[in-house]
Image (tube, helix red, strand yellow):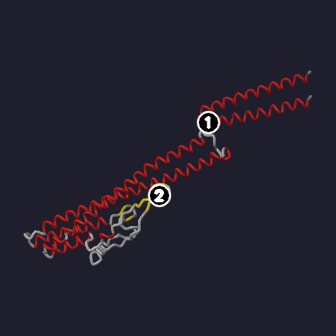
Amino acid sequence: MRVTDRLIFSTATLETGRAREAAEQAQEVVSRGTRIQHPSDDPAASGMIIAFNMSSDRFAAISSSAAAASDELSATDNALDGIGNALSRARELAVQFSNSTYSQAQRAGGAEEVAGLLGQVVSNLNTRFGNRYVFGGTKDGAPPFDPTPGPTFGNYLGDSAARNVEIAPGMLQQSNVLVGSMSTDSADPNSVLKTVQALQAALQANDPVAVQATLDGLDAGINQVSTTRSQVGASMNAFDTAISAARTASGDDKVRASKQGDVDLIESSIQLQATQTALQASLAATAQSCKLSLLDYLR
């Protein structure tokens, strides 16, 4: 009889321990709000959480890179706007001083203004955003257009390499603008800087015919700036769209990762109540078993 009683008591104690452990686990799940504390709790869900979090981080990085590229293109557009304004003013001066009624002194004054416009154009072409020269290709160690007065002034020192930024997984968008053709050493005889230099020289030489001859080049330069700005605008739109899409995707993946580990509060509360009820029942059964065994022993 004693062996039987001991067996009954041991079994009841074991079942009570299991019920208590289940109740404690249910209470912990409700308290944490998540059903996964360790990967072993649900290996499949844990793997999904890792995958969703990695995807979210990648989209966040894409959004950040696209935002930086969009900001750089905004600085590029501002520089092109400055170049376009300078060329428009140079054209006004060319139209004005191609008139034969102006004197040598007046054209000399115009030449001084054009010299200032030339410096303005080169300064804009050497615009820097952060640690990058926006028109230098991939070279950032020195200004892409030689600012040193002399025979090499305005020569292009950058490269023609494109900078590409990821706008979606596996998709790249060019983020820089290449305008090396505007330089003084360009193969184009009517490049922007060559034309402005020619206008300055014609004004200094008091040559209205040569002044008028620069108008076609100035028009071409203004059109080039306008076309380039249109391309910049299209690229900015692509990056801005990528920013919005990547931010949304990153947030969605964060939510998906969270849902893998989140608990249904109603379901977990019901489960907690059930385990607590089972624990109370087990405790009561164990107490009753011990009470009966003791009475049997005394009889």
* Amino acid type at mark 2: Met
Q: Earlier in the sequence, mark 2 or mark 1?
A: 1
How packed mark 1 is, by other alpha carbons closer than 10 Å (few <14, some 14-19, many 20 or more), is few
How packed mark 2 is, by other alpha carbons closer than 10 Å (few <14, some 14-19, many 20 or more), is few
Q: Nearer the viewer, residue 196 or 234?
A: 234
Q: Secondary structure at mark 2?
A: strand
Residue 145 point in image, percent of width and height: 32, 71
- Whether 198 is drawn above or below 51: the answer is below
Say left or right for 176 vs 62: left
Image quadrant where one finds the N terminus: top right
Residue 23: quarter of image: top right
Residue 258 point in image, percent of width and height: 56, 43
User: Marks 2 and 1, how far apart in space?
Assistant: 43 Å
Rendered residue at 31%/66% (across/down)? 125
Residue occupied by mark 2: 171
Say left or right for 66 vs 90: right
Q: Nearer the viewer, residue 11 or 200?
A: 200
Rendered residue at 64%/37% (across/down)? 29
Say left or right for 106 vs 124: left
Residue 205: quarter of image: bottom left
Residue occupied by mark 1: 31
Residue 276: quarter of image: top right
Say left or right for 181 vs 164: left
